Amino acid sequence: MKVQWRLEHEPQIKKNFHAKASHRLSQMLRDARIVGERPYWVSEDVWNNLLAHWNSPLYLNKCATTQKNRASIKGGTVHTIGSIATHEHVIRMV
């Protein structure tokens, strides 16, 4: 019984773990970037590569674009302009 349960739910357990671990790692690297100090668990070579990436024009442009999108006075998500909610579809169909 226990083995069957484990096999049945293992893909979802792994998916949840990787999603949470990825999010946490992103938070930790963001915090390190803001503070400007290399965490003890990141090697010097990897840290230097991250700094080079974070200071690249492509990354800085992407950051500026997303910052502008978040500060939009239009409200809501800028990327879905023109889409309508399911509720609005129902109203229009009636």
Image: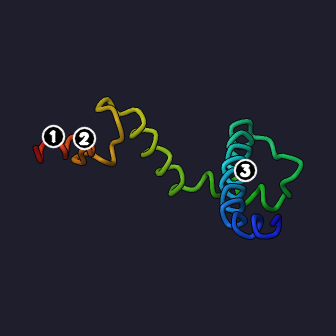
Foreground pick, 52 / 24: 24
Mark 3 falls on what kind of element? helix
Give the residue type at disc 3. Answer: Leu
The residues bearing labels 3 and 1 have C-alpha atoms spaced at a distance of 43 Å
Neighbour tally class for label 3: few under 14, some 14-19, many 20 plus, Cα within 10 Å:
few
Give the residue type at disc 1. Answer: Ile
Which colour style is shown?
Answer: rainbow
Above or below: residue 49 compared with residue 80? below
Judge left or right: residue 16 versus residue 38.
left
**Residue found 40% across the figure and 32% down from its top:** 71
Q: Position of residue 42 (x, y in %)?
A: 83, 54
The residues bearing labels 2 and 3 have C-alpha atoms spaced at a distance of 37 Å
Mark 3 highlights which residue?
25
Q: Earlier in the sequence, mark 2 or mark 3?
A: 3
Q: Quadrant of the C terminus?
A: top left
Q: Quadrant of residue 76?
A: top left
Mark 1 highlights which residue?
91
Mark 1 falls on what kind of element? helix
Foreground pick, 32 / 77: 77
Foreground tag (3 vs 1): 1
**Residue found 40% across the figure and 38% down from its top:** 68
Are circles 1 and 2 on residues that touch, CB within 8 Å? yes
Q: Which mark is residue 62?
A: none
Mark 2 falls on what kind of element? helix
Q: Position of residue 48 (x, y in %)?
A: 76, 57
Mark 2 highlights which residue?
87
Give the residue type at disc 2. Answer: His
